Image: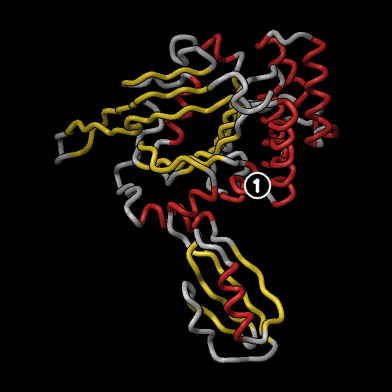
Amino acid sequence: MSAGSAGPLIELDGVEKVFTVRRRAGRLRRTRHEVRAVDGLTFQVPRGEMVGYLGPNGAGKSTTLKMLTGILVPSGGRLRVAGLDPARDRLRLARRIGVVLGQRTTLWWDLPLADSYDLVRRMYRIPPAVFRANLARCTELLGLGPLLDVPVRQLSLGQRMRGDLTAALLHDPEVLYLDEPTIGLDVVSKATVRTFLRELNTERGTTVVLTTHDLTDIEQLCRRVMVIDHGRLVFDGDLAGLRAAADGERTLVVDLARQLPPIDGVPGARTVRVEGPRQWLAFPAGHSAAPLVAAIAARYPLVDLSVREPDIEALVADLYARGGAARPQPGDEAPASP
């Protein structure tokens, strides 16, 4: 199923979540304060889309996911997933969603993977043929064959994460929520998980909402990026739009035939680094590199060049610094549960 072919799968309209917390105000006194973890959040996610959901700690990412799964009840606004109210229809919705939390396994600690999966089959009442087909597919793509008889407590973090991904997908969910799915994984395990998610989204049209601090996940998997801070959506678009919104800079790396003084007189660019015949010139992310290349080639003995895009982590930081969002202050983080 292609993205957007049947309308939005996830809809939020003015969603809020407010927690009441008590703070010490003396030796015996406690005062009550409201923490607005999510503040008027509005967006839609079409079917088949893979979305990156970014923000600093305490921004409201995990709170949003918990409301989308029905774990938390919104304090205000309207929320629908697959046409259902997650809080009121939690059991019905559970059959249509999959959830993977990077630091919290859903597998049974002392059971082998195969036994955990059999319990998942019984819980979701998965037809035997569907269960066997999905298990075989995930086992092959994630390399779980030698691990099916191994107790979960003996698995490495990367192996356990692959096991959790499989458990979340055995019942053919329409949407998959991933909270830090590659945290703590080695390079090989990260590549395996990313390849699997890409194929899952492309071949089966599974909608994926991904929160992560590993921005390489976003760059390699997501065409759409949403940035949240203090519970408010401060950006919603593609990576190119994020670069433009953050007013970041691209870098033109120029190799000259010989060492020369820093390149100057090129409109819209400035030399930021020189090492022998190689020079680095910074220019606005929204500008084309072609005029710069033409100007440099006309005046300097150009041998080679390349363009480097700004790092996405720097772009998000720049978006906050320019006032697009305010960084959370100590004590502002929302509690993990009500």
Residue at image position (49%, 54%) is 243
With respect to residue 281, does 247 lie above or below?
Answer: above
- Residue 133 screen position, x and y as percent: 82, 19
> Total marks drawn?
1
The image quadrant where one finds the N terminus is: top right
Residue 180 appears left or right of 330: right
- Residue 153 screen position, x and y as percent: 69, 34
- Residue 254 screen position, x and y as percent: 63, 77
Viewer-closest of 102 and 290:
290
- Residue 251 screen position, x and y as percent: 56, 69
Q: Secondary structure at mark 1?
A: helix
User: What colour scheme does the image use?
Assistant: secondary structure
Residue 154 can be seen in this image: no
With respect to residue 253, does 312 lie above or below?
Answer: above
Residue 221 appears left or right of 245: right
Circle 1 sits on which residue? Answer: 220
Quadrant of res 52? top right
Residue 300 appears left or right of 70: right
The image quadrant where one finds the C terminus is: top left
Q: Residues within 10 Å of mark 1 (few under 14, many from 20)?
A: few
Viewer-closest of 154 and 329:
329
Quadrant of res 144? top right
Residue 193 can be seen in this image: yes
Viewer-closest of 78 and 27:
78
With respect to residue 305, does 225 lie above or below?
Answer: above
Specify the amino acid type for callout 1.
Gln
Residue 267 appears left or right of 215: left
Residue at image position (46%, 26%) is 66
Viewer-closest of 313 and 44:
44
Residue at image position (67%, 30%) is 164
